[in-house]
Image: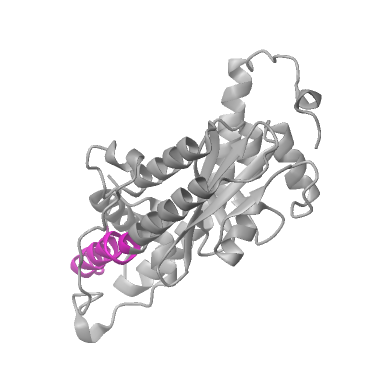
Amino acid sequence: MTDQTDHQTDHQPPPHPDLARLHAELRHLRARAHTHPLISQAQGILQERYTLPDGESAFALLQRASQQHNVRMRLLVEAVIRTPQPDPCHHPLWFPRRTRLPAPPLTYEAARRTNGDALHQGTVLRSVLSQLLAVTGTDMGNVQLPDRVRGGLRLEHHTGLSEEFVDFFAHVGEEGTSCAEAARIVSQVTIRNIESDPLLDEPSRRAILEAGSRASHSAPLFTPAGVCLGMVSAHMESPVRAMTTAQSAAMTELGAQAGQWLAWYNRTVLLDALEYLHALGTRRRGTASRRR
């Protein structure tokens, strides 16, 4: 095991404000480059479905549905692209036979501190990350969701990680990282020593080491049927031996609760947003709309 002191570096001054701004703009442009084609595809679907005069009208419907149900635009457009179109026989309902159920309870400590804001996906994901960091005793970590269009995982929230790390791992494929492996087998994966573990590909290893991480633990957010609906990972500053039995059990419970909540969200809040979008499109069929 490599001595921890071998990895220590001199304190670096904070980046110049202009450099930080440029990094932020670059991340924004990269995110737009990935999201814009999906929005355009969803606009085309809605234009054809509701005989809208232009893409701006389709975007206005997406924007209103996103705001009405507090669903991120990326998630909404993915759902529009992937969900079978409404059956004209069931006009004006998109999902006429579905049963709406209450949100499942989230009993872990970080969730109890969210002031009952349990319908917002971002709030729940941040609480999941906060709980994992408390269990593992670190301040570096991230939470990811499946990328339903490209495959793999996309980074949703993070804390304590460098801008370079966030840029590099904005999207993760299906191999070469602990989170990808944990998603594949739907089980926790611990990398005890980042420098030597053969699971990592070399570009990922370098990016993780440069962020100051020497060990990691990834835990899936899964349904009772064993489907992975998300991933939460902790990064430690020193190599570790293993997670304790108590830590592993706590993370299994966290993953089960969060996975059940995400499944509920996808079949309730997200479908509510799609239903609202369909109602708007039906009412506005053939007419122009403008974004707010």
How many labels, in total?
0
Residue 157 sits inside the magenta stretch: no
Q: Is residue 117 left or right of residue 167?
A: left
Which of the 4 image quarters holds residue 98?
bottom left
Q: Main secondary structure of the magenta part?
A: helix
Residue 53: % across, % down: 33, 64
> Which residue shows up at 73% across the image and 42% down it?
193
At 61% from the left edge and 30% from the top edge, which residue is drawn? 23
* Residue 203 locus on image (x, y percent): 77, 46
Residue 281 drawn in magenta: yes
- Between 274 and 193, the residue placed more toward the observer is 193
Measuring from the top left, give residue 214's x and y in whole percent: 70, 36
Extreme residue toward the bottom, this view: 89
> In this view of the protein, can residue 59 be seen by the observer?
yes
Q: Which residues are magenta?
A: 264-288
- Residue at 65 percent across and 31 percent down: it is 237
**In which quadrant of the rendered image does the N terminus lie?**
top right
Q: Is residue 15 above or below residue 122?
A: above
Q: Confirm whether residue 151 shows in the render.
A: no
> Would you say 237 lies left or right of 270 here?
right
